[in-house]
Image (cartoon, helix red, strand yellow):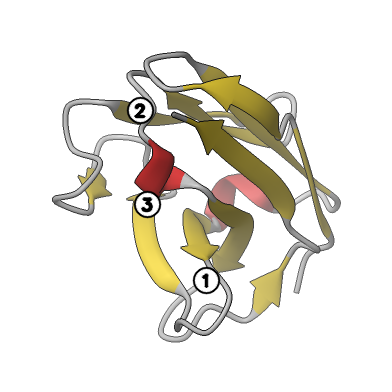
Amino acid sequence: QVQLVESGGGLVQAGGSLRLSCAASGRTFSRYDMGWFRQTPGKEREFVATIRWSIVHTYYADSVKGRFTISRDNAKNTVYLQMNSLKPEDTAVYYCAARLAGEWDSWGQGTQVTVSS
């Protein structure tokens, strides 16, 4: 497992942008698939985006496709989520996650994103 720490959340108006960062510990970061998930009160955690260890492949939830971009810098052990054209329905706690294969088994503590209308 790796230790993950998210940052970059905050309050933004609808139509604005935020960039989330997730810093990972460990020397094997480049071997991990990395993902972003989000959760609102009373709802299950939902998938937002993922980037494979190879960087070549990225996947997005339909609700964020075309607005969010996931990227990673393996030299900095960091994964990013650039969020543009934010909507009030994007308001949630955003979590970073990591896995070598199968289940997502490492999670950060989460960072709050609030989009006002």
What's the residue type where badge 1 is placed? Leu
**Residue receiving disc 1:** 100
- Label 3: state its secondary structure: strand
How far is the residue under mark 3 from the one under mark 1?
Answer: 13 Å
- Label 2: state its secondary structure: strand
**With respect to residue 15, does 11 lie above or below?**
below
How far is the residue under mark 2 from the one under mark 1?
Answer: 21 Å
Between 88 and 104, which is closer to the camera in this rendering?
88
What's the residue type where badge 2 is placed? Thr
Question: Residue 106 at what x, y percent from top left?
Answer: 69, 73
Q: Residue 69 got which mark? A: 2
**Residue receiving disc 3:** 50
Which residue is drawn at the image coordinates 43% and 26% (left, top)?
83
- Label 1: state its secondary structure: loop
Q: Quadrant of the N terminus?
A: bottom right
Which residue is drawn at the image coordinates 44% and 78% (left, top)?
101
How far is the residue under mark 2 from the one under mark 3?
Answer: 10 Å
Between 67 and 15, which is closer to the camera in this rendering?
15
What's the residue type where badge 3 is placed? Thr
User: Sequence order check: which comes first, mark 2 or mark 1?
Assistant: 2
Between 59 and 9, which is closer to the camera in this rendering?
9
Which residue is drawn at the image coordinates 63% and 31% (left, top)?
20
Q: Residues within 10 Å of mark 1 (few under 14, many from 20)?
A: some
- Name, please, the residue furthest toward the front: 117
Question: Residue 105 at what x, y percent from top left?
Answer: 62, 81
Question: Residue 84 at what x, y percent from top left?
Answer: 38, 19
**With respect to residue 47, does 49 lie above or below?**
above
